[in-house]
Amino acid sequence: MEKEQYEAQIKALKEEIELLKKKQTYEIKRQKYGLNWIDVPEAFEKDSENKIPVLEEVKEKSIKNDDGKPTHILIEGDNYHALQCLNYTHKGKVDVIYIDPPYNTGKEFRYNDVRFIKEYPDGTPVSINSPLRHSYWLSFMKKRLILAKNVLAKNGILFVSLDDNELANLKILCDSIFLEQNFLGILVQNKGNAQNDAKNIQKNHDYVLVYANNRKYENGKEQHIICTDNEELKEVFLDSENNQYYYKGAGIVTGGEGGTLNARENLGWSIYYREETNDAIGISDYNIELAKTSNTEKDVYKDNVELLNKGYKIIRPPKKGNKLGCWTWSLEKFNREKNHILINKTTNGYSVIKKEYVSSDEVFELDTKKFIKIKGLRNIKSIHNYSSSAGTTLLNDILGSKEFENPKNLNFIQFLIKSIHNKSSTILDFFAGSGTTLHATMKLNEEDGGNRQCILVQLNENNICEEVTYERNHRVMQGYTNSKGEQIPGLGNSLKYYKTAFIGQNNCKNANDDDRTELAKKAGCLLSLGENTLDEICSTEYYQLFTGSKEATAVYFTDDYEKFDEFKEKVAELATKYKKTFVYIFAWSSADDFAYEFEDVPNIQIKAIPLPILEIYKSIYNA
């Protein structure tokens, strides 16, 4: 009887323990690490609050140079609404985002709190003593960074300049949006002009937070994003298994004093390799406890005799002095990604190195061999000396007088853009300020023959967008006379100037048929920007035609199809001149019903409007 009672008690205790474990697990999962702040709704102008954002071209500000260089984009308006538009036109297309947002120092940052808009009217700076100071700034940044992530390419990169006022907060915020594993590091800009009136530590440096959109974006392989300035040639080889080029990278042996087996117990596994079949297997064949006390390989490792009998050779990490070494990769990673490893026989055994894959577009032939120009990956310095006063001096040289406080250093922005090894990248700056990012993009293209395209977004508060951002780059493109009376030749390039605008009487979630009809009529700039066919060559009451360097876009934007036959003729003409023509047609659902109308027209792609635009906007609205 006592035995049965004890067994019942034991069973009851086990059940109680399991319940406690489940409760504890639930509590742990419920707790989230991260920032907590009062999320403050942002008040916008009444015209934009419940309407649908679009872009309208300001044609008189267009800059056209027939020099074969890129056409860049300047959007005047609140960057939140501009980013909504770019979420349609450039979703997943932007390679580099650089922003220099308000630092929230208590002087320059303004936020319209929708709850207190009557008490705190538009244009009131956020005081450094405001209890909601950080909440305003975080609410402001979070919305914009989420939209920014959507436009980044899968291997895109984000640079954010700021000082120590919001550095800690922004790091945690970006960790939550871009994920902590995509944090690449912090760069330090030594500005060279210490504040001599500082009460404590002189602050003569700013920071740049650097994030990848997805650090492991292709077959689980980490993308090497950041480079240094020193280019070198690397011979590349074709991997027949995946038809990709690679160069021979670094080994996977842990260096330094800490690279020993007793310091990193989980990294002491062995590679069993058979040369005849180029087959490699990672196996854990060592005793962890013995590894802590012994440096004798025969004591620590136990050979897999079965594989040795099949002709496999053992490769183990080389010793560090008289201590057993270890790998940089875990056993699981090696077996998962061993097709990214190259094993070569050497005089002392075998070398185990990484294959660093590269784009075939960058490969060129030299003396019957193939090479790529690379830079010292992963070796970028964290501290860079770029004077902040140099940005002001240059801007004054271009515009003739001081028009803007604290413009960024041109060479520093060039350095950031150049650190991305892609000369045809799309670059976005949605806190454009004086327009340094566009200037840096054009100057870098001039120096290395690149074809980078830049998109700027700037609010026209105090006429900054028109009189500083636009005017600076207008002069840089066309040429100007500096403060010394010297004529500075223009860099060429072209530019399109857009403004954010709003249509309809309802937001995207509640859009009615009238709103949809108006959106279709006003979508031309969105569509042409999305296809990078920026030159409008024809506009009627029924359709618009746009062209680019190699492609064209045709838009039939009304449900009155009286001129549709005429439109088809225009599309056929474009198809004979351009590599591809994108045909947008007003449709209440899909554009499939119009496919037969263009059966004889080659190289076209038919799409519907306006529903795809509304779907993108709805996803933003719901988020």
Image (spheres, rainbow, N blue to C red):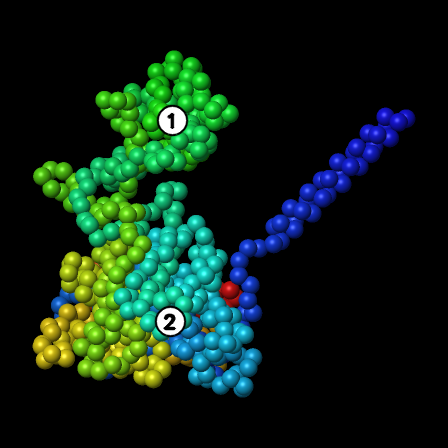
Q: How many marks?
A: 2
Q: Position of residue 16 (x, y in %)?
A: 76, 41
The residue depicted at 30 percent of the width and 74 percent of the height is 406
Which tag, 1 or 2, sits closer to the chain's start? 2
Residue named by callout 2: 198
Q: Position of residue 438 (x, y in %)?
A: 25, 68
Q: Quadrant of residue 490?
A: bottom left
Mark linked to residue 377? none
Q: Quadrant of residue 488?
A: bottom left
Residue 89 in view, yes or no = no
Q: Is residue 60 above or below residue 580?
A: below
Element at label 2: loop
Q: Locate residue 423 relative to residue 154 in the image: left or right.
A: left
Q: Locate residue 76 relative to residue 610 in the image: left or right.
A: left
Crowding around mark 2 (Cα neighbors within 10 Å: few <14, some 14 to 19, many 20+) is: few
Q: Amino acid at mark 1?
A: Lys
Q: Is residue 123 above or below residue 65?
A: below
Between 1 and 486, the residue placed more toward the observer is: 486
Residue most toward the top?
309
The residue depicted at 18 percent of the width and 65 percent of the height is 443
Q: Position of residue 218 (x, y in %)?
A: 36, 45
Q: Quadrant of the N terminus?
A: top right
Q: Quadrant of residue 565?
A: bottom left
The residue depicted at 39 percent of the width and 36 percent of the height is 258
Crowding around mark 1 (Cα neighbors within 10 Å: few <14, some 14 to 19, many 20+) is: some
Q: Amino acid at mark 2?
A: Ala
Spatial CA distance of label 1 from label 2 is 51 Å
The residue depicted at 27 percent of the width and 66 percent of the height is 192
Q: Position of residue 229 (x, y in %)?
A: 21, 53
Mark linked to residue 323? 1
